[in-house]
Every structure is written in structure tokens, then in C-alpha cells.
Image (cartoon, coloured by chain):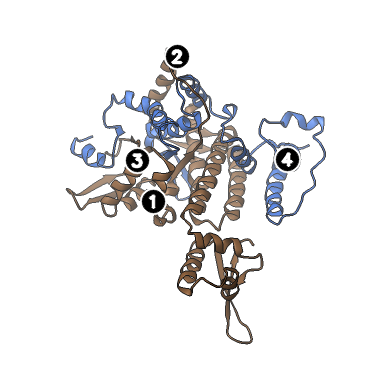
Amino acid sequence: MTETDHGLLVQDEFATLLTQLRNEPQMKSTFTTMYGVPGTICVNFIKTEGDLILTKPIFGIAAASTPEWLVHHTNKEDYVSGFLARFLLCNLLHSGKRLPYPPPPDATKLGAINQRFNQLYELSPEAICPSNDFKTVVESVYEQMSAIIEQNRQNPALCASLGRLQSDYFYKFAILEATLNNSATLTSDDGLRAAYLTAFFTAQAITFFEKVGSTKRSELEKRILSLIPSGGISKTELHKALGGKITAAQLNPALDALVKAEVLSAEKETTSSKPRTVYCKYGG
Amino acid sequence: MDPEKKKTDTLTQYTIFDRFKELGIEIAQDPPATPEDEPYTTTATNTQTGPPQPGVSIGQDVETFIQNGFHIDKDRLNEYYCNYLDVYEPCTEARPEYILTALLSSIGSAIGKNRHLAHGASIIYPNIWSAIIGPSTSMRKSTALKIASKPVASYEDGSEALLSCPSCCRRAHSSGH
């Protein structure tokens, strides 16, 4: 992996990659840094052969996983640290298509797409420039993505992912569009097609992180969330609403986790007697 | 109607519409589209007030994807992606959206640092990290990965451009790649 090389890391089981990264201390944060193509980076292999200095490393990753494996092999840190936010996620259900004996691809068409692909390797370094029309599209994308992020700010992991789509991936898609069109100028059409892909992965992120968020939440946390009224609730009121049988040792960590995950806000209220904390859902 | 005004209206309607929806406020639907609006009609489900608008419609597209099971409209993709999917879609049970997701990583890796975009103080390169997720075996995830990474593998003839694990960093380094 030298300054001029670029490759693709293909991993059939994404969870294996995550486990391998965990086995080398600091490797996950090193990987996270490499996403931004840093000038130089020292990769430290403590368990094996020591340090390796890389100059402007760049590579793509194409991985696959079952949802269960991914949820099992990731922890909260993976979601909030931004590591997973750097991945485009595509989580789908079966389309019902059945193809017991698939035909081979059309050789003529295959030759054409492979030839075009190979040309991408032969490009000389060149900067891509945005046209004014593209900048107009950018402004709309930025505003619309900001609105979506604002609506989902109770889910930090999702917001991190949406932030990447807004600030990075939209532009990466646009670079691909211009390059595939043999142009070094970004047009509004490039922007609109990039925005369409951004919408696809935004929808994917919203459904994926909602699913992960709800599966990673404890039963008590889910019950608490279902009991919080629009005006908020104090701990005493919540204790009563839960039937009065939950101990403080159970209730406090659950509330703290929801506050830390920014699902709930905890606001101190002064009263005539002792001050109380009111828990409210964000946006509610 | 002025197309520029329509773009602005789309943005305004989206934000307000969703805020209203969060608050549980019913919004009256706009009158049916007039003939002059018809050229802007798209195949996407219009979940907002008024006729579909030209331009950027991320909120609307997001809702459409969630409602339609994430089916990509190929008419809104680059010609190259369409051609790629047209070649491989008849040959696999894998969903085209899986192939497309992994293909973005392949194309980005082929371009590498030869194209970049200055964005404020930073430089954006087209390196793309993707993960396709789905139930085991039946979704043909590995097939989709193979299809999307095939041109990378064939270009480099199975050499180190197609990396298989994080230890590639060491292997690539030691072989002078």
C-alpha cells in the first residue's frame, strides 16, 4: 500500500473484520482515521511486527453481514465513535426472486462495462470542480439533510451516519458521477443523481439504526420510554407509573443510559421543597 | 410556475410538513395538479402536499424508499450503474441494490486518489466503505460482493488490489506493493 496504490478490501463477513480490528489495539481508530486519507499514518501492530508508516493510504471496503452478527459484534462505542458511521449500510429483505439455474452474463455488454471500469485505473490525477448549478443542488441537499438530522437528534448513532452522508458521501457519489461521465466538472445532474443515492442510504440508515437502537435497549428502558408523557415526568412519578416495584438500583442506570444516549433530557426543577429532576423525550 | 420557486417550496414544505406531522397536526392537501404541473410528475410516491417538484427531494425519496422496500429507480441512476445492473441482474437472485452498494466501493477504489474535490479546508476522495446486511445465504450477499468486485479482481488479476483482510497492510508492504 504505497502513495500511488489503491485497493478494495472485500470481507464476506463484516463481523470478522470487526473482530480482527479489535484484536490489534488502536486498529479501529487507525482505520477510522484512514477513511479520511491522512497525509501519513503510523499503523501500530503491537501483537505482531511493530510499526508501519503509510503515506496517504486509500482503499475502499465492501463487506457483508447478517444483522444478528453485526449487532452482536458491535458495541455502543462503534456506533457513537463514528466508525460505523463511515459505512454505507444496505439492509434489505428478500425480493422473492428465484433463479435455480442462472444464465451467464451477456458477454458483449460485460466486455463494455469491464473496459469502462479498467479505464478508471488509467486516470491521471485531476481535481473535480463544482459548477454553479451543482452548488445550488448542494445547498438544497445540505438544508434537507440538516432537517432530517435535526428530526433524529435523539439518536446520536444515526445522526453520525446522516452527518457522513451529508458532509462526505454526497460528494463522493458526485465525484463518481462526474468521473463516469468523463468530466472534471460537477453538474446539477451529477448532484441530483448523487442526492438520489444519498436519499437511499439515508433511508437505510434511518431504518437500520432505529432497529439497532430498539434491540440494544433493555426491556426496562423500553417501558420507561413508553411511559414518558409529552410534558415530562419526575423520577417519583415514573416509579409509580412502573408499578412501584422497580428499585432505585434498577431505575437509575436505565434513566442514565437513556439520558446518555440523548433519548431523554434530564432537567432540574426547583420546587418549594427539594429540587426534582424531570425527564422529557427530545422533541416531546 | 417558476421552477426556481418550486425548488424553494419543496424545501419549505418538507420541513414544515414534518414538524406538523411530529406535532400531530393534520395538513390539508393542495388542490390536484394543474396541467402545467404535469411535466414534473415522477414515479415516486408523493407524500407531501402539492404536486411532485423537480430538483432535490431527499425527504420525499427517503419516505418512498422506506415505503417501497428500498427499490431503486434505475432511471435516476448513472448510465454506467444501469448497464452494470442490466448485465448482472438476470444472472443472480441478489438484489440490485446490494450490487450497486458494493459497486460504489469498487468504482471508488478504482479511481483512488486520481480524482478529488476540494471542500473547504479538506479534500474529499471517492473511497467508499460499504456493508450489505441481510439474512444468511438466501439474500446472496456474497454473490453481490463478488459481482461488484469482479472488475477490480480481473484488472489486477487477483493480486493485491483485492484485499481480503486487515493484515493486507502488512502483506502489501512486505511485497513492496
**Label 1: how many residues lie within 10 Å, few (<14), some (14-19) or many (20+)?**
some
Of the residues shown, which amino acid type is indicated by label 1?
Answer: Thr
- Label 4 vs label 2, nearer the camera: 2
User: Chain A in the picture: what colour?
Assistant: brown
* Mark 4, residue position: B6
Chain B: its colour in the image is blue
Q: Residue drawn at (47%, 23%), measured in percent from left and top?
A: B84
**Circle 3: residue type:** Ile
Chain ID at mark 2: A
Dot in front, 4 or 1: 1
Q: Which residue is located at x 51 percent, y 53 percent? A: A214
Q: Amino acid at mark 2?
A: Asp
Viewer-side residue, A234 vs B103:
A234
Q: Position of residue A160 (x, y in %)?
A: 48, 52
User: Closest to the observer: A11 or A163?
Assistant: A11
Q: CA distance from mark 3 to mark 2?
A: 32 Å
Q: Which residue is identified by label 2?
A: A106
Chain letter of the residue beneath label 3 in the structure image? A
Residue occupied by mark 3: A58
User: In this view of the protein, which residue sits in the foreground, A239 or A192?
Assistant: A239
In this rendering, the label closer to the viewer, 3 or 1: 1
Q: Earlier in the sequence, mark 3 or mark 2?
A: 3
Compared to A146, does B156 lie above or below? above
Q: Which mark is residue A74?
A: 1
Q: CA distance from mark 4 to mark 2?
A: 43 Å
